[in-house]
Image: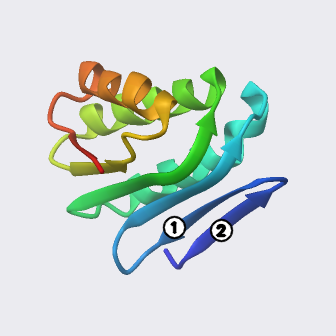
Amino acid sequence: MSDTEIKGPGYRVLYDANSATVHFEGSLRLGTAEYEPIAALLNSVLEQRPQAITLRMTDLVFLNSSGINTLYKFAIAIRKLGGLAVHVQASSTISWQSKSLPNLRKFLPTITLTMN
């Protein structure tokens, strides 16, 4: 899979194939169905079966509940797949991240969360 980018008003999601890193930027305030392209991108990353995936959230200032649900579903898919290391890079200064991202461990206990 080559690099892929999804852009919309005020946000960008970019997959860097060389580092198997998904970068989230801006503010994601989409409706549930509008997260489908992002969910499809995440699932296509899983289909490539990299040894590790990094989710870089440090530049994502807001993610609504539909987006958080999309991340939780992704974590469940990773758990079902097995054998994949997941690293999440987050910012402790962005309140939704410190509240919601640690909950990813409920769905994927092996996840590594780094709060800068």
Question: Mark 2 and 1 residues: CB-CB less than 8 Å, in contact?
Answer: yes
Mark 2 sits on what residue?
A: 5
Say above or below: 69 vs 59: above
| 4 lies left or right of 22 | right
Residue at horizontal 25 percent and vertical 33 percent from the top: 79
- For this rendering, which residue is in front, 116 or 26? 116
| 82 lies left or right of 17 | left
Say above or below: 17 vs 51: below
Mark 1 sits on what residue?
A: 15
x and y, in percent, of residue 66 in the image = 64, 24
Q: Residue furthest front?
A: 93
User: Pointer 2: residues within 10 angstroms few (<14), some, or many (20+)?
Assistant: some
Is label 2 in a helix, a strand or a loop?
Answer: strand
x and y, in percent, of residue 6 in the image = 70, 61
Residue at horizontal 24 percent and vertical 29 percent from the top: 108
Q: Amino acid at mark 1?
A: Tyr
